[in-house]
Amino acid sequence: MAEHHPPYNYKEDGIAKGIVYDVVCLIMDNVGESDTKIVFVPWARGYHSLENGSGDVLFSMGRTPERENKFKFVGPVFKTSEYFYRKKGSNVDVVNIDDAKAVSKIGVVRSTFPHQVLIQKGFTKLDVGSSYEAGFHKLLKGRVDLISVSDEMLQRLFIDFPDIDSSMFERVGPPICSASGYIAFGLHVSDTVVLEWQKALDELKESGEYQKIVDKYLNWHNE
């Protein structure tokens, strides 16, 4: 299972692509699992399926102490930081993370790493949605004061919605959290399979193939 999370995993004109998607496909080729089906699902559904054993693999997932005993991990496949973003011209000001507790609503995606971090930090005014796109629309309409999003995801959203641009939004405050993304496996998947995937990933990094994939998407991103 994969969630829609550009530039890591997404579909464009019906074609699946992304940094982690491409890496996973190469791993599957290398371990003889090229016929395995990859389906795109909402994050919360995929997370629940992996947790209850009805799904086998989900990517990409932040590795946290709370998740360590729930899943098995292969990675890391990327590193990123999440920040608060506000609509340009908003009077919402965030100097440190706790300042954000004073706003009316913060848009987050259900069961993501930032969602869990904010809960742990005592945030209660969270508007929990199923996707980054939903939170983005709410920010545009003034239904939330801030959204939690990475710079990479935000740039992708600007591409998906060409009637808006980066001048309409601005980042505020320090990082909410920094995380490494992993390929997550259900506990029912054998350690032998997980180790085989990790070895294949390590070989992609050593050969330079992994970096070629990253450069392909992030160089395109920065054009």
Image (tube, rainbow, N blue to C red):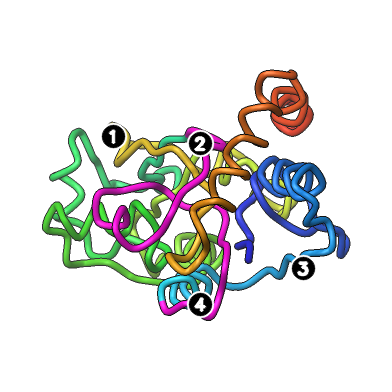
Amino acid carrying label 4: it is Arg
Q: Find numbered disc 4 in the image and state the secondary structure of the residue it sits on.
A: helix
Which segment did they paint magenta?
52-79
Work out which quarter of the rendered image holds the C terminus and state it.
Answer: top right
Which labelled disc corresponds to residue 37?
3
The N terminus lies in which quarter of the figure?
bottom right
Residue located at (27% from left, 47% from top): 92
Q: Which mark is residue 76?
A: 2
> Image quadrant of residue 219?
top right
Q: Which mark is residue 45?
A: 4
**Three-letter amino acid code of the residue under disc 1:** Gly
Toward the viewer: 160 or 187?
187
Label 4: how many Cα within 10 Å (few below 14, some 14–19, many 20+): some
Q: Which sits earlier in the primary sequence, circle 3 or circle 1?
A: 3
Q: Are marks 4 and 1 in contact (CB under 8 Å)?
A: no
Estimate the spatial distance between the alpha carbons at disc 3 and disc 4, rounded to whole Å.
Answer: 17 Å
Lower sequence index among marks 3 and 2 = 3
Kindly report the distance in space between the C-alpha atoms of the residues bearing marks 4 and 2: 22 Å
Q: Tag 3's secondary structure?
A: loop
Q: CA distance from mark 3 to mark 1?
A: 40 Å
Q: Is residue 164 above or below residue 46?
A: above
